[in-house]
Amino acid sequence: EEVKDQIVDLVGCSREEIRLLFGNMGELIALHRKMQKEMEGGRRDVPDLFKEYTPLMDVYCTYVRNLPRAMRLLEMLQTRSRFRSFVAARLEEVAKAHHHIRGDGGAITYLPSYLILPVQKIPRYVLLLEELSKAVQVLQAFQGDTARITVAVKGIKEVARRMNEEALLAEEY
């Protein structure tokens, strides 16, 4: 509690304002850490993981419901110099760490962009799962045709080998 009070003093806003600003982001983070842990090392496949966790993703609805209020609050908080200074310093730290890790300048340096990220995650999951579905359908279409595909690959590799030989012979003349 004492640490939380120090943070509140440092940032220049109340605990309630911080709670409203970030909504249930802690729940979202906990959910994804759990999902990530289950996926690491290939212990879970994507369809089963999403089948199990989709009912828990209603936390996104709660987050989206709070987001307009959070954005209005953010506008108000940004009029406070201590808040602006704190956020600017934290975003700069994140940008430096991001640059160090990825070697580019692609870090987000604008707090509203961070707040909108969870809203963008579900549409990305939709695209991911649709692409996965298409890939599985393609693979199923070729199931049983692996022998024919193997023959085709061997044939085209042979053509590539002969082309390389011809190129070498052409260089000799």
Image: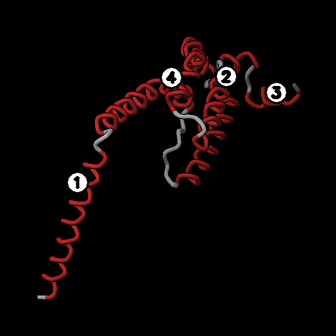
Q: Secondary structure at mark 2?
A: helix
- Type of the residue with mark 1: Ala
Labels 3, 1: front one? 1
Residue in the image at 75% along x and 19% along y: 14
Q: Earlier in the sequence, mark 4 or mark 3?
A: 3
**Label 2 to label 3: alpha-carbon separation:** 18 Å
The quarter of the image holding the N terminus is: top right
> Residue at label 3?
4
Q: Earlier in the sequence, mark 1 or mark 4?
A: 4
Residue in the image at 74% along x and 26% along y: 12
> Residue at label 1?
152
**Label 4 to label 3: alpha-carbon separation:** 27 Å
| Residue at far right of view | 2
Q: Residues within 10 Å of mark 3 (few under 14, many from 20)?
A: few
Labels 2, 4: front one? 2
Labels 2, 1: front one? 1
**Are discs 3 and 1 less than 8 Å apart at CB?**
no
Query: Could you say where residue 64 lies in the image, as x and y percent from the top left?
Result: 54, 15
> Residue at label 2?
27
**Are discs 2 and 1 less than 8 Å apart at CB?**
no
